[in-house]
Amino acid sequence: MEYKILGVRIWKIFVYFIIYSFIGYIIETIFGIATMGVWQSRQSFLYGPFLGIYGVRCSIYYIICTDILIKIILNYF
């Protein structure tokens, strides 16, 4: 059985969450070093180098945009 949210598979959402959480951590770390000149702890509710807010945001964007793109494609083609 394949689980989906608005037509998007759960594993895809999870993969995007992990990828963008890690990218968000990297970007915030680079920004902190560039602006303050020191390494700051960017600990969130996840263990490891992840910032969940970026993962949640990008996963939601992916779900919404995928749904909208499918509707546009079906309406025009």
Image (cartoon, rainbow, N blue to C red):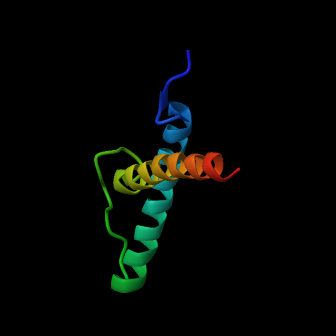
Quarter the N terminus occupies? top right
**Residue under the point 59% across and 53% down:** 72
**Residue under the point 63% across and 45% down:** 74
- Could you say which is closer to the camera, residue 37 or residue 77? 77
Q: Position of residue 70 (x, y in %)?
A: 59, 46
- Could you say which is closer to the camera, residue 42 or residue 22? 22
In this rendering, position of residue 56 left or right of residue 9: left
In this rendering, position of residue 34 left or right of residue 36: right
Q: Position of residue 67 (x, y in %)?
A: 51, 46
Image quadrant assignment for residue 9 = top right
Residue that protrudes farthest toward the top in the picture:
1
In this rendering, position of residue 59 left or right of residue 35: right
Q: Classify 8 as above or below 29.
A: above
Residue 46 visible in the current orientation = yes
Residue that protrudes farthest toward the right in the picture:
77
- Could you say which is closer to the camera, residue 9 or residue 67? 67
Q: Classify 75 as above or below 40.
A: above
Q: Classify 60 as above or below 10.
A: below
**Residue under the point 37% across and 71% down:** 39
Q: Classify 28 as above or below 55.
A: below
Total labels: the figure holds: 0
Q: Position of residue 63 (x, y in %)?
A: 48, 46
Q: Position of residue 41 (x, y in %)?
A: 31, 62
**Residue under the point 46% across and 50% down:** 64
- Could you say which is closer to the camera, residue 51 or residue 75? 75
